[in-house]
Image (cartoon, rainbow, N blue to C red):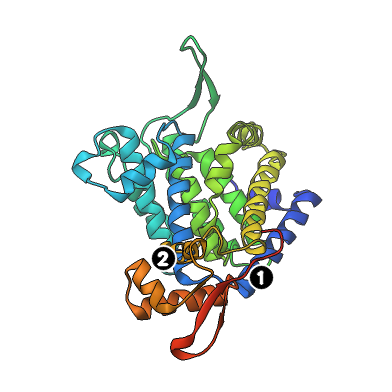
Amino acid sequence: MALEKLNARIKTVSNSVNIKIAGIDEFKGMFMQGINLSPQILNRMKKSTIITSTGASTRIEGSTMSDKGVEKLLNNIQVQKLKDRDSQEVAGYAELMKIIFASYEDIVFSENTIFNLHNILLKYSDKDEHHKGRYKTSSNKVVARDGDGNESIVFNPTEPFLTPIEMKELVEWIITNINGKEYHPLLVIANFVLEFLSIHPFKDGNGRLSRALTNLLLLQKGYKYVMYESHEKLIEDSKIQYYLALRKSQERIKAEDNDITPWVEYFFGILHKQAQNVKKIMDSNPAESLLSSNQEKAMKLFEKYEEITTMLAVKELKIARPTAKQILSRLVELKFVEKSGKSRGTKYRKIFKEGK
C-alpha cells in the first residue's frame, strides 16, 4: 500500500460530499454551543445508543438478538452464562462501546490500541480465544453463499504476510493526517475505515471493530453527538447499500486509478443523517421523550392534579423533598411546567403547548 494513494483518494471527493461535510461541521458547532439537556438525560441517551449500536453492529454480522434482548442481557450480564455466540459478541461490543464513550479523550491511537480494542471486542468469544488481539495468520477471503450453500469469493483482502506492514503504514498515515491541515479529518476517517476493511487485518471481528473505531475517531475529533445517535443502526438499516458501496470501492483498491466515490458518498450519507437525527431531537421537545424516570412520573401527576406542590410530589412519588424540589425545578427549566408562589406556597402547573 503506497501512502500516496491514500492522499490521492481524498483529493477526488465530489462536491456533494463537501456539502455534507459542511453540514456536519455546522451541526457539530451548534451541538457544542446549544446543548441544553441535563447530565441525567444525556446519560440515558448514551445508554440507549450503546444498546442500539451493539444490537445493530452485531446483527450486521449475523447475530439475531433484538435490541430488547440486548438490553435484557446487559442489565443482568453474567459471564458464566454467555454460552451462545450472539450473547458473547453482544457483551464484547457493548463493553467496547462503554470504554470508548467513557475514555476516548485518554485513548492514544496506535497499533497497540487497535490490538487492545480487538481483544475487548472478542473478550467473551470462546471461538476467538486464540487469535483475539493479533493479526490474522491465514487468509480470510470474504465469501458469499447462495441458497444452495455454494460459495463465491466477493473480495480478497490483504494476505497475512503483508498485513503487519500495511497496518503499520495505515496507522502512521492516519496519525499524521487526522490532525493535519491538508485534509479534513472526516475524509481521513472515511479513507482509514475503507482501507482497514480492505486489509481485513484480523481473523474475525473486522466489521464490528471498524464501526467501533469510527466512533472513537469521531469523538476524538470533537463530534461528541455521536454518543447520542447510533451510526451502526443507520448502517444496519441500509445494509445492502453498505456492502455495495464497500465492494464497488474495493474492486480495484490497489490500482493507481481506483475510485472510492461509492464508499465515501455512502459513509458521509450515514454521518450526515446521524447529525440530522440528533438535530431533530434538539429542535423538538428535547426532554419530552428523554426525561428521567422520576421526571416522567412527576409529569404524569398532572393527569390527576391541575396543580402540584413539592410535598404532593414527595407523597405521590415516594421520594425525598430535596429530590422532588430538584425534579420540579428542572421541569421548570425545560419549560414543561411553570411555578407560582413562594416558599411553601409554591405551586406548579403544566404548560400546555400549542398543538399539544
- Percent coordinates x, y for residue 68 in the rendering: 41, 41
- The residue where tag 2 is placed is 294
Residue 149, position in %: x, y? Answer: 46, 12
- Indicate which disc residue 29 carries: 1
Residue at 38 percent of width and 35 percent of height = 203
- Residue lying farthest to the left in this orientation: 80
As drawn, 108 above or below 243: below
Does 96 appear above or below 156? below
Q: Looking at the image, which residue is at 41% across and 69% down?
A: 106
Q: Position of residue 316 (x, y in %)?
A: 37, 67
Distance Cα–Cα, label 1 vs label 2: 31 Å
Secondary element type, mark 2: helix
| Furthest residue in direction bottom, as rendered | 343
Give the residue at the far right of this rendering: 15
Farthest residue, direction top: 148
Q: Position of residue 224 (x, y in %)?
A: 55, 64
